[in-house]
Image (spheres, rainbow, N blue to C red):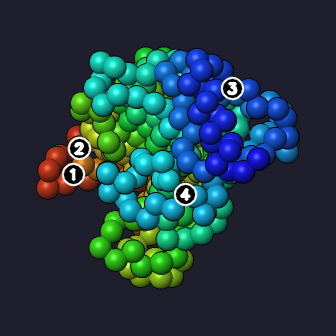
Amino acid sequence: MSAAANSAAVDAAFASGLRALHIRPGTSFAIARSLVLPSGGTLVGHGKGQQRPTIVMPAACFTNDRGDAGSRYGPTAAGIVVATDNRAAQAAQGVRIVNIALRSERRDGRVLRGIVARNVVDLELADVDISGLPVGVAFCLASIRGSSRIERCRAHDCRSDRDWGAQHPQITGLEIDNDRIDDVATTGLVVDGFRAEDLTVGPAFLAAHGYETDGVNICAPEATGNLFRDILVRNVGEGIDTFGCDSRFEKVVAQNCHIYGIKCVHGASRNVFDRPIIRNAGLAGITVSGSNERVSSPHRVVRVDS
Protein backbone atom coordinates (compact mmCIF):
# COMPACT_ATOMS: atom_id res chain seq x y z
CA MET A 1 0.00 0.00 0.00
CA SER A 2 1.08 3.59 -0.59
CA ALA A 3 1.87 6.01 2.21
CA ALA A 4 -1.41 7.82 1.51
CA ALA A 5 -3.38 4.58 1.63
CA ASN A 6 -1.73 3.59 4.91
CA SER A 7 -2.60 6.93 6.49
CA ALA A 8 -6.19 6.67 5.26
CA ALA A 9 -6.51 3.15 6.67
CA VAL A 10 -5.26 4.19 10.11
CA ASP A 11 -7.51 7.26 10.15
CA ALA A 12 -10.52 5.14 9.21
CA ALA A 13 -9.76 2.59 11.92
CA PHE A 14 -9.68 5.17 14.69
CA ALA A 15 -12.68 7.03 13.24
CA SER A 16 -14.66 3.77 13.46
CA GLY A 17 -14.15 3.70 17.23
CA LEU A 18 -11.07 1.47 17.37
CA ARG A 19 -8.87 2.43 20.31
CA ALA A 20 -6.01 -0.09 20.04
CA LEU A 21 -3.90 -0.62 16.94
CA HIS A 22 -1.50 -3.59 17.08
CA ILE A 23 1.29 -3.91 14.52
CA ARG A 24 2.70 -7.32 13.57
CA PRO A 25 6.39 -8.19 14.11
CA GLY A 26 8.68 -7.15 11.29
CA THR A 27 6.16 -4.77 9.73
CA SER A 28 7.39 -1.59 8.06
CA PHE A 29 5.06 0.94 6.47
CA ALA A 30 5.13 4.57 5.39
CA ILE A 31 2.62 7.27 6.27
CA ALA A 32 1.79 10.39 4.26
CA ARG A 33 0.70 12.62 7.15
CA SER A 34 0.52 12.61 10.92
CA LEU A 35 -0.85 9.45 12.48
CA VAL A 36 -3.34 10.83 15.02
CA LEU A 37 -4.11 8.88 18.19
CA PRO A 38 -7.39 9.68 19.94
CA SER A 39 -7.87 9.99 23.68
CA GLY A 40 -7.58 6.50 25.12
CA GLY A 41 -5.74 5.34 22.01
CA THR A 42 -3.06 2.68 22.02
CA LEU A 43 -0.41 1.96 19.41
CA VAL A 44 1.52 -1.24 20.15
CA GLY A 45 4.18 -2.95 18.10
CA HIS A 46 4.98 -6.64 18.50
CA GLY A 47 8.43 -8.11 18.01
CA LYS A 48 11.82 -7.24 19.45
CA GLY A 49 15.13 -6.19 17.91
CA GLN A 50 15.01 -6.23 14.13
CA GLN A 51 11.42 -7.43 14.32
CA ARG A 52 10.23 -4.25 16.03
CA PRO A 53 7.69 -2.59 13.70
CA THR A 54 8.84 0.55 11.87
CA ILE A 55 6.78 3.54 10.76
CA VAL A 56 8.48 5.62 8.05
CA MET A 57 8.08 9.36 7.49
CA PRO A 58 8.94 9.86 3.77
CA ALA A 59 10.73 13.09 2.89
CA ALA A 60 8.35 13.61 -0.03
CA CYS A 61 5.39 13.71 2.38
CA PHE A 62 6.78 15.36 5.50
CA THR A 63 7.84 18.64 3.94
CA ASN A 64 7.38 21.29 6.63
CA ASP A 65 10.27 23.74 6.63
CA ARG A 66 9.11 26.24 9.28
CA GLY A 67 9.73 26.17 13.03
CA ASP A 68 7.05 28.63 14.15
CA ALA A 69 4.23 27.45 16.42
CA GLY A 70 1.70 27.66 13.61
CA SER A 71 3.68 25.24 11.44
CA ARG A 72 5.53 22.76 13.64
CA TYR A 73 2.53 20.63 14.61
CA GLY A 74 0.91 20.35 11.20
CA PRO A 75 0.17 17.10 9.32
CA THR A 76 3.39 17.36 7.27
CA ALA A 77 5.51 18.23 10.32
CA ALA A 78 4.82 15.53 12.94
CA GLY A 79 4.87 11.74 12.63
CA ILE A 80 2.55 10.69 15.48
CA VAL A 81 0.27 13.18 17.25
CA VAL A 82 -1.99 12.68 20.25
CA ALA A 83 -5.31 14.32 19.44
CA THR A 84 -6.16 16.91 22.05
CA ASP A 85 -7.99 20.15 22.69
CA ASN A 86 -6.41 23.55 23.22
CA ARG A 87 -8.17 23.73 26.58
CA ALA A 88 -6.48 22.09 29.55
CA ALA A 89 -9.82 20.82 30.87
CA GLN A 90 -10.23 18.71 27.71
CA ALA A 91 -7.00 16.75 28.03
CA ALA A 92 -6.51 13.43 26.27
CA GLN A 93 -6.52 10.49 28.68
CA GLY A 94 -4.62 7.23 28.90
CA VAL A 95 -2.68 7.23 25.62
CA ARG A 96 -0.06 4.48 25.05
CA ILE A 97 2.63 4.15 22.37
CA VAL A 98 4.73 1.05 22.90
CA ASN A 99 7.51 -0.77 21.05
CA ILE A 100 7.75 0.95 17.68
CA ALA A 101 10.50 2.56 15.62
CA LEU A 102 9.77 5.85 13.87
CA ARG A 103 12.17 6.69 11.04
CA SER A 104 12.40 9.88 9.04
CA GLU A 105 13.95 9.65 5.61
CA ARG A 106 17.08 11.76 5.58
CA ARG A 107 16.70 15.08 3.80
CA ASP A 108 17.83 18.37 5.29
CA GLY A 109 15.90 21.62 5.10
CA ARG A 110 12.84 20.34 6.98
CA VAL A 111 11.56 20.93 10.54
CA LEU A 112 9.93 17.81 11.98
CA ARG A 113 8.68 16.28 15.18
CA GLY A 114 8.56 12.56 15.81
CA ILE A 115 5.92 12.15 18.52
CA VAL A 116 3.84 15.08 19.77
CA ALA A 117 1.87 14.69 23.00
CA ARG A 118 0.45 17.91 24.46
CA ASN A 119 -2.26 18.17 27.10
CA VAL A 120 -2.31 14.50 28.07
CA VAL A 121 -3.11 12.81 31.38
CA ASP A 122 -1.63 9.33 32.00
CA LEU A 123 0.64 9.12 28.97
CA GLU A 124 2.84 6.07 28.41
CA LEU A 125 5.68 5.94 25.89
CA ALA A 126 7.80 2.79 26.16
CA ASP A 127 10.47 1.23 23.95
CA VAL A 128 10.06 3.82 21.21
CA ASP A 129 13.02 4.55 18.92
CA ILE A 130 13.09 7.71 16.77
CA SER A 131 15.81 8.57 14.27
CA GLY A 132 16.68 10.41 11.08
CA LEU A 133 15.05 13.77 11.77
CA PRO A 134 16.70 16.91 10.42
CA VAL A 135 15.97 19.99 12.55
CA GLY A 136 13.22 19.35 15.10
CA VAL A 137 12.27 17.29 18.13
CA ALA A 138 12.07 13.53 18.50
CA PHE A 139 9.81 13.42 21.58
CA CYS A 140 7.77 16.62 22.02
CA LEU A 141 5.75 16.77 25.26
CA ALA A 142 3.85 19.58 26.96
CA SER A 143 1.26 19.87 29.72
CA ILE A 144 1.66 16.22 30.77
CA ARG A 145 0.06 15.19 34.07
CA GLY A 146 -1.20 12.21 36.02
CA SER A 147 0.72 8.93 36.12
CA SER A 148 2.74 9.55 32.97
CA ARG A 149 5.90 7.63 32.11
CA ILE A 150 8.54 7.64 29.40
CA GLU A 151 10.50 4.40 29.57
CA ARG A 152 13.41 3.04 27.52
CA CYS A 153 12.92 5.49 24.66
CA ARG A 154 15.69 6.64 22.34
CA ALA A 155 16.36 9.54 19.95
CA HIS A 156 19.41 9.23 17.72
CA ASP A 157 21.16 10.01 14.44
CA CYS A 158 19.53 13.35 13.69
CA ARG A 159 21.53 15.93 11.77
CA SER A 160 21.38 19.23 9.90
CA ASP A 161 24.02 21.10 7.97
CA ARG A 162 22.63 24.29 6.48
CA ASP A 163 22.23 27.97 7.28
CA TRP A 164 18.62 28.49 8.34
CA GLY A 165 18.79 32.26 8.05
CA ALA A 166 16.55 34.12 10.49
CA GLN A 167 15.00 30.94 11.89
CA HIS A 168 16.24 29.53 15.21
CA PRO A 169 16.86 25.88 14.41
CA GLN A 170 17.48 23.25 17.06
CA ILE A 171 17.61 19.46 17.28
CA THR A 172 16.26 18.02 20.54
CA GLY A 173 15.84 14.47 21.77
CA LEU A 174 13.19 15.13 24.46
CA GLU A 175 11.46 18.49 24.77
CA ILE A 176 9.12 19.33 27.65
CA ASP A 177 6.77 22.32 27.93
CA ASN A 178 7.89 24.49 25.04
CA ASP A 179 4.26 25.02 23.97
CA ARG A 180 2.03 24.46 26.97
CA ILE A 181 -1.75 24.31 26.76
CA ASP A 182 -3.45 27.02 28.87
CA ASP A 183 -0.07 27.49 30.61
CA VAL A 184 -0.52 24.13 32.35
CA ALA A 185 2.90 22.70 33.16
CA THR A 186 4.18 19.15 33.15
CA THR A 187 4.25 17.70 36.67
CA GLY A 188 4.93 14.26 38.11
CA LEU A 189 6.39 12.85 34.89
CA VAL A 190 8.80 9.90 35.21
CA VAL A 191 11.44 9.55 32.49
CA ASP A 192 13.39 6.33 32.94
CA GLY A 193 16.09 4.93 30.64
CA PHE A 194 15.98 7.70 28.02
CA ARG A 195 18.78 7.85 25.43
CA ALA A 196 19.73 10.77 23.14
CA GLU A 197 22.72 10.06 20.93
CA ASP A 198 24.36 11.63 17.89
CA LEU A 199 22.23 14.76 17.52
CA THR A 200 24.71 16.63 15.38
CA VAL A 201 25.24 19.60 13.10
CA GLY A 202 27.61 20.19 10.21
CA PRO A 203 29.95 23.13 9.52
CA ALA A 204 27.41 25.32 7.69
CA PHE A 205 24.90 25.01 10.55
CA LEU A 206 27.61 25.48 13.18
CA ALA A 207 28.92 28.68 11.64
CA ALA A 208 25.43 30.19 11.38
CA HIS A 209 23.79 29.03 14.62
CA GLY A 210 26.25 27.33 16.95
CA TYR A 211 25.87 23.79 18.25
CA GLU A 212 22.12 23.96 18.86
CA THR A 213 21.27 20.40 19.87
CA ASP A 214 19.98 19.19 23.26
CA GLY A 215 19.54 15.71 24.63
CA VAL A 216 16.79 16.84 27.04
CA ASN A 217 15.32 20.36 27.09
CA ILE A 218 12.87 21.35 29.83
CA CYS A 219 11.54 24.70 28.67
CA ALA A 220 9.59 26.16 31.61
CA PRO A 221 10.32 26.85 35.29
CA GLU A 222 6.73 25.80 35.99
CA ALA A 223 7.64 22.21 35.04
CA THR A 224 8.08 20.79 38.54
CA GLY A 225 8.23 17.56 40.49
CA ASN A 226 9.49 15.42 37.62
CA LEU A 227 11.89 12.49 37.87
CA PHE A 228 14.63 11.70 35.34
CA ARG A 229 16.46 8.45 35.97
CA ASP A 230 19.15 6.53 34.06
CA ILE A 231 19.57 9.12 31.30
CA LEU A 232 22.31 8.86 28.66
CA VAL A 233 23.14 11.77 26.36
CA ARG A 234 26.07 11.39 23.99
CA ASN A 235 27.48 13.49 21.17
CA VAL A 236 25.10 16.44 21.45
CA GLY A 237 25.50 20.18 21.97
CA GLU A 238 24.12 20.21 25.52
CA GLY A 239 23.14 17.13 27.50
CA ILE A 240 20.46 18.39 29.92
CA ASP A 241 19.21 21.95 29.35
CA THR A 242 16.63 22.71 32.01
CA PHE A 243 14.58 25.71 33.06
CA GLY A 244 12.51 23.45 35.36
CA CYS A 245 12.30 23.36 39.14
CA ASP A 246 12.03 20.96 42.08
CA SER A 247 12.87 17.90 40.00
CA ARG A 248 15.29 15.04 40.49
CA PHE A 249 17.90 13.72 38.08
CA GLU A 250 19.41 10.35 38.98
CA LYS A 251 22.32 8.69 37.16
CA VAL A 252 22.60 11.12 34.27
CA VAL A 253 25.52 10.25 31.98
CA ALA A 254 26.58 13.08 29.64
CA GLN A 255 29.37 12.18 27.21
CA ASN A 256 30.97 14.28 24.50
CA CYS A 257 28.68 17.28 24.92
CA HIS A 258 30.12 20.06 22.77
CA ILE A 259 29.02 22.85 25.15
CA TYR A 260 27.63 21.78 28.56
CA GLY A 261 26.87 18.43 30.13
CA ILE A 262 24.15 19.91 32.38
CA LYS A 263 22.81 23.47 32.11
CA CYS A 264 20.38 25.03 34.60
CA VAL A 265 19.17 28.40 33.36
CA HIS A 266 16.21 30.81 32.98
CA GLY A 267 14.85 30.28 36.49
CA ALA A 268 15.75 26.62 36.99
CA SER A 269 15.78 26.12 40.77
CA ARG A 270 16.05 23.56 43.56
CA ASN A 271 16.73 20.56 41.34
CA VAL A 272 18.72 17.59 42.66
CA PHE A 273 21.36 15.88 40.53
CA ASP A 274 22.27 12.54 42.07
CA ARG A 275 25.49 10.91 40.83
CA PRO A 276 25.82 12.54 37.38
CA ILE A 277 28.71 11.33 35.24
CA ILE A 278 30.06 13.94 32.82
CA ARG A 279 32.86 13.24 30.37
CA ASN A 280 34.42 15.43 27.68
CA ALA A 281 32.22 18.51 28.00
CA GLY A 282 33.36 21.30 25.70
CA LEU A 283 32.88 24.33 28.00
CA ALA A 284 31.78 23.01 31.39
CA GLY A 285 30.35 19.90 32.98
CA ILE A 286 27.64 21.74 34.94
CA THR A 287 26.60 25.38 34.67
CA VAL A 288 23.96 27.27 36.68
CA SER A 289 22.97 30.77 35.63
CA GLY A 290 20.05 33.15 35.57
CA SER A 291 18.89 35.30 32.68
CA ASN A 292 17.51 38.77 32.08
CA GLU A 293 14.07 37.33 32.86
CA ARG A 294 14.55 34.99 35.84
CA VAL A 295 17.03 34.21 38.59
CA SER A 296 18.07 30.59 39.07
CA SER A 297 18.15 29.48 42.72
CA PRO A 298 20.57 26.95 44.20
CA HIS A 299 20.62 23.30 43.18
CA ARG A 300 21.92 20.29 44.97
CA VAL A 301 24.52 18.07 43.36
CA VAL A 302 25.24 14.75 45.03
CA ARG A 303 28.57 13.25 43.97
CA VAL A 304 29.78 14.00 40.46
CA ASP A 305 32.01 11.70 38.43
CA SER A 306 33.87 13.33 35.57
* Element on which disc 3 rests: strand
Residue pictured at 32% horizontal, 51% vertical: 69
**Is mark 2 in CB contact (under 8 Å) with mark 1?**
yes
Residue placed under numbered mark 1 in the picture: 290
* Element on which disc 4 rests: loop
- Circle 3 crowding by C-alpha within 10 Å: few under 14, some 14–19, many from 20: some
The disc label shown at residue 258, or none:
none
- Expressed as whole percent of the image width and height from the top left, the position of residue 265 reads 29, 50
Q: Can residue 132 be seen in this view?
A: no
Q: Which of marks 4 and 2 is nearer the N terminus?
A: 4
Query: The residue under label 4 is which amino acid type?
Result: Phe
Residue placed under numbered mark 4 in the picture: 62
Q: Which of marks 3 and 1 is nearer the N terminus?
A: 3
Residue pictured at 85% horizontal, 45% vertical: 50
* Element on which disc 1 rests: loop
Residue placed under numbered mark 2 in the picture: 267
